[in-house]
Amino acid sequence: MSLSEIYQTFIANIKQTRWPEWASTIMQILSVWYARKNNVWVYPTGIVGVLLASYVYYFLSVPPLYADAILNIYYFLMSVYGWYNWVQKKDAAEAYPISWCSKKELSVGIGFFFVFWAAIYFLLIKITDSNTPVLDSLVSASAVTAMWWMAKRKIENWHAWIFSNIVAIPLNFYKGFMLFTLMYVLFLVMAYMGYISWKKEIKNK
């Protein structure tokens, strides 16, 4: 496909974008912005965004992006868990302060990634009509780790998000979700900025 054809496809799909994708994109961008600011509003905005994204991936994609649809339900559950964690007060200052992963937390997170990658890929090729099992499973598995580390306010969550976003960009473009494609490009930039911001914050403590 030439650059001209890619551009024409992009514009045509943007014009056909339906309201759930627009609303989901706006709320998810707000959520990532709040995450970079280390603000608890990352969770309520994210909850709305991911529930709408799950609807888009399951009901508007042909064939459905099964893993991404289920992944966004996982996002919802982890957002509730993370929201609860963030509002708990260990002392007068802050609950769950930003920190690096311990060796155990790092091992568990990486383990989550490989286990979920293998399991999701197997399920996609065996029981669904997915035509993107490799990318779909990679995005989902890396996001599982990212959300778990984020709920614990671990800096490594940004590493996992950066990887997940890099994979999600071509996946969403291929499926015709141009607004989501742009969103993940923005997420990639914001994830890097979030990493730099959190790293500075922990150095200043």
Image: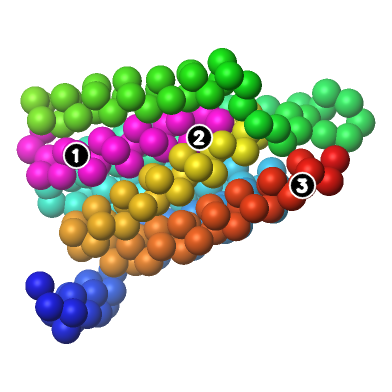
Residue 152 in view here: yes
The answer to whether residue 87 is above or below residue 26 is above
Picture residue at 56% right of the left edge, 31% below the top? 149
Q: Are marks 1 and 3 in contact (CB under 8 Å)?
A: no
Question: Splitting the image into 4 quarters, where does residue 14 fall?
Answer: bottom left
Q: Main secondary structure of the magenta part?
A: helix
Q: Which mark is residue 147?
A: 2
Q: Quadrant of the C terminus?
A: top right
Kind of element beneath mark 3? helix
Picture residue at 58% right of the left edge, 19% below the top? 103
Q: Are marks 2 and 3 in contact (CB under 8 Å)?
A: no
The answer to whether residue 2 is above or below residue 34 is below
Residue 60 in view here: no
Residue type, mark 1 in image: Val
Label 2: how many residues lie within 10 Å, few (<14), some (14-19) or many (20+)?
many
Q: Which mark is residue 201?
A: 3
Question: Splitting the image into 4 quarters, where does residue 9 fall?
Answer: bottom left
Q: From which residue to which does the magenta span run? A: 128-149
Q: Position of residue 29 (x, y in %)?
A: 52, 59
- Left or right side of 125 for 35: right
Residue type, mark 2 in image: Met
Q: Quadrant of the N terminus?
A: bottom left
